[in-house]
């Protein structure tokens, strides 16, 4: 019985951590450094969620960070020809979408299945 309780406590703790990570990614729109803290925590704690539905959330968050960073760099470079603002806007909308979908799935205790173009399947 204690092993089951420990497993449930660990899952609950990891779910709370996942909520915090979504919050840190969201806060990065105001304070950019929070996404760096979140990505580090994603990699450090990834092994703790292996084999649970939370593993898909960690993968979702990690991919969101790296893809968004690459697209943001491309957007900054393209600002020379004035289309960079559109790329940065699209990147921001895409990140918000991923954060909202992730939060909804986490609230439902469901994994995230990634589909085409980084959208949820």
Image (cartoon, rainbow, N blue to C red):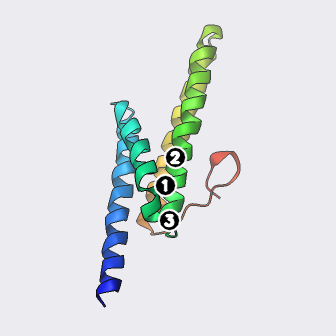
Extreme residue in the top direction: 80
Disc 2 to disc 3, how far (Cα)?
14 Å
Q: Which residue is mark 3?
A: 50
Identify which residue, 82 or 112, lies in the foreground.
112
Residue 25 image offset from top left, x and y in percent: 40, 42
Image position of 92 (left or right of 6): right
Callout 2: SS = helix
Residue 86 seen in render? no
Residue at 54% x, 28% y is 89
State whether residue 117 is above or below residue 1. above
Residue at 46% x, 56% y is 46
Q: Which residue is mark 2?
A: 62
| Residue found at the very far right of the displayed protein | 116
Q: Report crowding for label 1: few under 14, some 14 to 19, many 20 or more residues within 10 A (C-alpha).
A: many
Q: Secondary structure at mark 1?
A: helix
Per the image, the residue denoted by label 1 is: 58
Residue at the spot x=31%, y=91% of the render? 1
For the question of whether residue 96 can be seen, the reply is yes
Secondary structure of residue under mark 3: loop
- Is the C-beta separation of discs 2 and 1 under 8 Å? yes
Q: Could you tell me residue 37's position as x and y percent?
A: 36, 40
């Amino acid at each position: 019985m204690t092993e089951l309780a420990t497993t449930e406590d660990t899952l609950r703790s990891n779910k709370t951590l996942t909520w915090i990570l979504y919050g840190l990614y969201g806060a990065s729109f105001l304070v950019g450094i929070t996404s760096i803290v979140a990505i580090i925590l994603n990699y450090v704690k990834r092994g703790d969620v292996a084999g649970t539905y939370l593993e898909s959330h960690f993968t979702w968050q990690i991919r969101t960070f790296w893809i968004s960073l690459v697209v943001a760099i491309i957007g900054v470079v393209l600002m020379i020809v004035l289309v960079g603002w559109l790329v940065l806007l699209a990147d921001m909308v895409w990140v918000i979408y991923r954060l909202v979908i992730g939060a909804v799935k986490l609230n439902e205790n469901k994994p995230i299945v990634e589909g085409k173009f980084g959208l949820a399947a």
